[in-house]
Image (cartoon, rainbow, N blue to C red):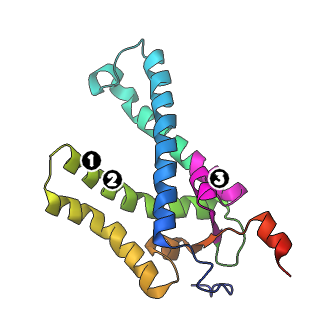
């Protein structure tokens, strides 16, 4: 693994800030997915999107949703290193040398992070629907919690940061840069 560029512990974004940005981005993506689903439903003659109604196109619909998510994160991370949620919480993602991600690194990061967040979200939804108990919720949230515990213990990144050779740092505003010597 390449050695990270010098970054003191104060610049690495903490778990609460990261989770808040992820929640914000999740709400934005939910809205986009609703719009995409409405468009697909309109193209389907207004019928509900079910296995019977969509038939062989159900995989195309899933691929479309996956593409929307990948385009959202990939374009944000490769352009500025910040999604809208990350901008709101003043954090950005960069590679270990401190530069913006390329598309390969962005997709690797997304592929490493998505299962952790989706499993935790699935556990929360199952608990909210009373389909699982508190133990099932804890089991679903454990991988994400362990990843952020690793961040707190080592101060060098969560699991998906380490696997994708990236880091999430606190973004410095233009005003703060202007004040710096």
Residue under pointer 1: 125
- Asked if the residue at tag 1 contacts the one at tag 2, i.e. Cβ–Cβ closer than 8 Å, the answer is yes
Q: Residues within 10 Å of mark 3 (few under 14, many from 20)?
A: some
Q: Is residue 106 above or below residue 37?
A: below
In the image shown, does 21 or 57 lie closer to the viewer? 21
Q: Residues within 10 Å of mark 2 (few under 14, many from 20)?
A: some
> Which residues make up the magenta segment?
71-94
* Residue depicted at x 43% and y 20%: 41
Identify the residue under disc 2. Answer: 121
Q: Mark 3 or mark 1, which has the lower sequence index? A: 3
Q: CA distance from mark 3 to mark 2?
A: 22 Å
Q: CA distance from mark 2 to mark 1?
A: 6 Å
Q: Is residue 99 magenta?
A: no
SS at circle 1:
helix
Whether the magenta-drawn stretch holds residue 81 is answered as yes
Q: Quadrant of residue 146?
A: bottom left
């Amino acid at each position: 693994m390449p050695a990270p560029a010098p970054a003191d512990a104060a610049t690495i974004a903490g778990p609460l800030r990261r989770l808040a940005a992820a929640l914000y981005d999740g709400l934005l993506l939910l809205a986009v997915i609703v719009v995409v689903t409405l468009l697909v439903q309109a193209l389907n003659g207004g019928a509900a999107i079910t296995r019977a109604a969509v038939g062989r196109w159900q995989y195309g619909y899933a691929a479309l949703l996956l593409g929307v998510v990948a385009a959202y994160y990939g374009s944000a991370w490769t352009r500025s290193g910040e999604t809208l949620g990350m901008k709101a919480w003043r954090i950005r993602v960069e590679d270990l040398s401190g530069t913006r991600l390329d598309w390969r690194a962005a997709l690797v990061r997304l592929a490493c992070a998505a299962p952790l967040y989706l499993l935790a979200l699935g556990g929360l939804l199952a608990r909210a629907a009373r389909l699982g108990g508190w133990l099932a919720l804890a089991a679903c949230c454990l991988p994400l919690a362990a990843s952020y515990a690793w961040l707190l213990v080592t101060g060098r990144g969560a699991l998906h940061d380490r696997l994708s050779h990236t880091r999430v740092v606190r973004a410095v505003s233009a005003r703060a840069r202007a004040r710096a010597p």
